[in-house]
Image (spheres, helix red, strand yellow):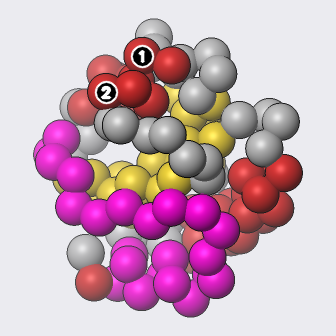
Amino acid sequence: MAEGIVVDVTSTTWDREVLRADGLLMIVFWAEWCKPCLTIYSMVEELAKEYAEKVKVVRLNIDDNADIASNYKVSIIPTTTFIKRRQKLHEIIGVVPKMQLKEAIESL
């Protein structure tokens, strides 16, 4: 599935990287000015490596890709959304403990 890295996606790569993906995706909506977003990034990287065979982890900068953030109704960041085959399964808003993200991955 994933290679254990966090893939930066944009409006240009969204279809290829997200909409055409078969398995579980963890999408982190973020912005460079968002301190909480930067705080969780190392945790997100760890999860990408730990669950490389189970989930593809991508992140989308909402400032550069407002159209996609709007389509997913993201108004607070960081927002972590889990989707599979274009269907939203779960969403976590804000900074949460790593264990909460792990539990979401395991349950999905």
Q: Quadrant of residue 26?
A: bottom left
Is residue 57 among the parts visible in the rendering? no
Residue 59: image location, x then y, percent: 57, 41
Residue 56: image location, x then y, percent: 43, 53
Q: From what the image shows, is residue 10 above or below residue 107?
A: above
Q: Are marks 1 and 2 in contact (CB under 8 Å)?
A: yes
How many numbered circles are shown? 2
Q: Residue furthest front?
A: 75
The CA distance from mark 1 to mark 2 is 6 Å
Which of the pair 53/20 is nearer the observer?
Answer: 20
Q: Residue at x 71, y 70 (%)?
A: 43
- The residue to which callout 1 is attached is 67
Residue 4: image location, x then y, percent: 58, 59
Q: Secondary structure at mark 1?
A: helix
- The three-letter code of the residue at mark 2 reads Asn
The answer to if 95 sits in the magenta stretch is yes
Q: Residues within 10 Å of mark 1 (few under 14, many from 20)?
A: few
- The residue to which callout 2 is attached is 71
Q: Residue at x 51, y 19 (%)?
A: 66
Quarter occupied by the C terminus:
bottom left
49 left or right of 68 in image: right
Q: Quadrant of residue 91?
A: bottom left
- Residue range (magenta): 85-106
Which of the pair 63/3 is nearer the observer?
Answer: 63
- The three-letter code of the residue at mark 1 reads Asp
Which of the pair 32/13 is nearer the observer?
Answer: 32
Is residue 46 among the parts visible in the rendering? yes
Quarter occupied by the N terminus:
bottom left
Residue 69: image location, x then y, percent: 44, 30
Q: Quadrant of residue 90?
A: bottom left
Q: Residue at x 49, y 40 (%)?
A: 75
7 left or right of 56 in image: right
